Amino acid sequence: VESGFMTKKTALQLAIFESGERQIVLAKRTGIHETRFSKIVHGHYAGNDDERRKIAKALRRSVAELFPVSVEASLGDGR
């Protein structure tokens, strides 16, 4: 039985966990404000290309690995 407190983690959240680094340390290393960094990590803000590249570099991962594009986003709404 799963706990109600368990939530599905994103690739970015898992990479941060696996790195053993604190979010604030990664934010400072990337030069992204802590609040903005947190919003990107928790999916409240997608981040721009430069921010995504900085985060991927800090975590030694690819942008595509950390920020997979959804099928819906890549297809658009068909209008």
Image (tube, rainbow, N blue to C red):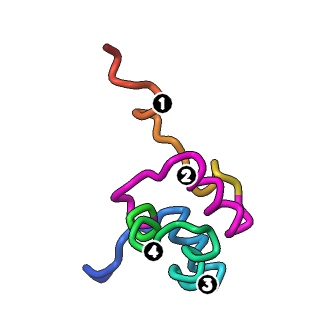
The residue tagged 3 is: 21
What secondary structure is marked by label 1?
Answer: helix
**Figure quadrant of residue 6:** bottom left
Mark sitting earlier along the chain (1/4): 4
What secondary structure is marked by label 4?
Answer: helix
Q: Position of residue 21 (x, y in %)?
A: 61, 84
Measured in 3D between alpha carbons, the distance from the residue under mark 2 to the one under mark 1, in whole angstroms, is 13 Å
Query: Looking at the image, is 72 positioned above or below residue 3?
Result: above
Residue type, mark 3 in image: Glu
The residue tagged 2 is: 67
The residue tagged 4 is: 34
Q: Are marks 2 and 1 in contact (CB under 8 Å)?
A: no
The residue tagged 1 is: 74
Among all residues in the image, which is located at the extreme right? 60
User: Between tags 4 and 3, which lies in front?
Assistant: 4
Mark sitting earlier along the chain (3/2): 3
Is residue 50 rendered magenta in the image?
A: yes
Residue type, mark 2 in image: Phe
Mark 4: give few (<14), some (14-19) or many (20+) Cα within 10 Å.
Answer: some
User: Between tags 4 and 2, which lies in front?
Assistant: 4
Residue type, mark 4 in image: Glu
Q: Position of residue 46 (x, y in %)?
A: 43, 51
Point 57% across, 46% down: residue:
49
Q: Which span of residues is magenta-colored? A: 41-61
